[in-house]
Image (cartoon, rainbow, N blue to C red):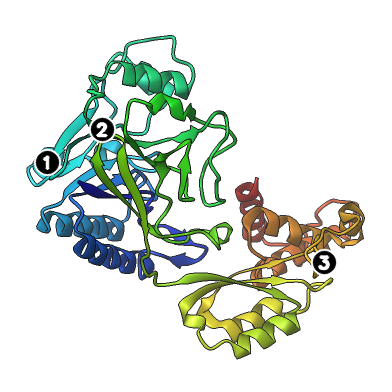
Amino acid sequence: MKFFHIADLHLGRMLYHIPLIEEDQPFWVEQFLLAVDEHQPDAVVIAGDIYDRKVPSVEAMKLFDHLITELAKRDKYVFVIPGNHDSSARLSHVRGLLAMHRIYIAGELERDLQRVTVHGEETDVTFYLMPYLFPRLAADERVLGRDDLSTYDEAARALLAVQEIDESSCSVLVAHQNVLANGVPPEHSESETIIGGLGEIECSAFDAFDYVALGHIHNAQRIGRETARYAGCPIYYDFSELNRDKALTLVNIHGKGRIEVERIEIPLKHMLRRESGTLKELLEAGSRMEDKEKYYIQCVLCDKYLPPRALEQLREVYGSSLVNVKRSIDEGRDGRAADSPGAELAALNIREQFSRFYQEQMNEMLDGDQEGIVQKILEQQSRGSGEFILDVKSIPREDSRELLDFLLQAT
């Protein structure tokens, strides 16, 4: 039997100021359904983070409803687990009714994992659905009732130890975790909300399963063995994923030890593109570009000093395709780091230092309005010894609050 392994749909996500739910995510869903029609899998596995928020938007819920409804019309098994971005209770609403149509959605973590056996032409495969797991939840009286589980690895091993797994038959675990291979972490992207080594589980905890269908990490990759894999996110969520493969993972299980994994190309509404150079070079490149509408574009400014009206000029040339502008301050045109970044930083004036700090934290440049707020504060500070002077020209309270919000979001 064969199935598509997908994950991290993050329906409702934004790419900077672009709501992907308007064009890119619906386009991907339709292309995915075409791939289902072409390759005729027996099942579709969705390994968590269906939504980008625990309380999803109406548009995101409608799109997911459309996806599973169309899969049900095609008489496909569908296996879904909640990820750390999902609300288990909301996602698994009316799951009993959905199961009557071969749509199996795991709810909150329980002692006995939900399992479903699919009878294929060559072999039967049992799917085990493990919702996003963390130690405190696994230790709860309603699950394992233990007080000695302090790590994610301990919790996962303890939970799987109480499952009745027939290792003589084929089995698939669907999980949404941060999995390591002999201490080596997976390759992350900057679009993941994961900090350091949070939630690490060694891949050996899943040795009893023939295939491990993972979600949580946005770069598609094997982890430890060919048959333990992250599907990766289906479309681009960040420019750190610029050169990443966004193909579909198709798994074909012929029997014990006979598993084939294939990557299937799928069209996307927009690809990512990065242009680097001085403002003059970027404007010239943009004026020559004939297919801007196919891309979301990031411009990297390499000017030593920030040119006036740089953002406005780039927007005029690149139009709505321009989604992010940043400066390359510490790198020369050949890509090498400057000899003394600290000395370069010291040479910057206060406004440039703040602009750089904001760019590094928020991954975008200050726009004209934001620069205006910063300039007002700097002008006011320069009139005294670090104290605000309350006069008719002083910065309005709402502008101070806006700047404070910028700083809080960046820290």
Residue 245 seen from this side = yes
> Can you say whether 357 is above or below 297 in the image?
above
Compare marks 1 and 2 and give the one earlier in the sequence.
1
Circle on res. 99: 1
Mark toward the viewer: 1 or 2: 2
Place of residue 237 in the rendered image (x, y in percent of width and height, measured from the top left):
48, 59
Amino acid type at image mark 1? Ala
Look at mark 2 in the image and give the residue it sits on: 171
Residue neighbourhood size for the residue with mark 2, other residues' Cα within 10 Å, grouped as few (<14), some (14–19), many (≥20):
many
> Can you say whether 200 is above or below 60 in the image?
above
The secondary element bearing badge 2 is classed as strand
The secondary element bearing badge 3 is classed as loop
Which one is nearer the viewer's eye here, 141 or 69? 69
Residue neighbourhood size for the residue with mark 1, other residues' Cα within 10 Å, grouped as few (<14), some (14–19), many (≥20):
some
Q: Is residue 2 left or right of residue 73?
A: right
Which one is nearer the viewer's eye here, 265 or 199? 265
Residue neighbourhood size for the residue with mark 3, other residues' Cα within 10 Å, grouped as few (<14), some (14–19), many (≥20):
some
Mark toward the viewer: 2 or 3: 2
Location of residue 287 (image quadrant)? bottom right
Which one is nearer the viewer's eye here, 251 or 161? 251
Look at mark 3 in the image and give the residue it sits on: 332
